[in-house]
Image (cartoon, rainbow, N blue to C red):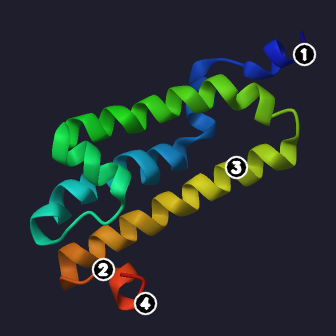
Amino acid sequence: MEACNTRGSFSSYLYEIRFIILFYVIGDWASTVYALPRGTEYNPVPAMILENYGIYHLLLVKVGFIFLLFYVAPVIKASRERWVFTKHIIESVGIFVTVNNLMVIWYGNSLVQAIGLV
């Protein structure tokens, strides 16, 4: 029963994950839209979605991830440290991919390419 109480409202959940929404959903998606004409998507999952379904389906997958996270959040929130860690990991990934895409837009070379991963 306690897991139901930790769920809270959807609006408070959205506020809690505002940086995930800003960087992982909006930042990555918007910068991908602008970076694709200048580069290539190297991540195989988004590349497959983009090739087969288009850019708006990638956004739908990201929004679906937000709903999935909302669904599993009560289990993760059983440990405060685990919830904070999970949020920071997703936020960090969002910041990294947004910066990577912005480098493609501004410099024609991504951070991943600059450090030699691709």
Relative to 102, say whether 29 is above or below.
Answer: above
Q: Name which of mark 1 and mark 4 comes first in the sequence.
A: 1
Give the residue type that dot 4 points to: Ile
The residue at the point 88 percent across, 40 percent down is: 79
Quickly name the residue at label 3.
86
Give the residue type that dot 2 points to: Ser
Give the residue type that dot 1 points to: Glu
User: Is 68 placed left or right of 62 in the picture?
Assistant: right
Quickly name the residue at label 2.
110
The residue at the point 80 percent across, 34 percent down is: 77
Q: Quadrant of residue 9?
A: top right
User: Is 69 placed left or right of 95 in the picture?
Assistant: right
Q: Name which of mark 1 and mark 2 comes first in the sequence.
A: 1
Confirm whether residue 54 shows in the render. Answer: no
Quickly name the residue at label 4.
115
Please state which of the two labelled residues, at mark 1 or mark 2, is closer to the viewer: 2
Q: Position of residue 12 (x, y in %)?
A: 63, 27
Relative to 101, say whether 66 is above or below.
Answer: above
Q: CA distance from mark 4 to mark 3?
A: 26 Å
Relative to 17, say whether 89 is above or below.
Answer: below
Quickly name the residue at label 1.
2
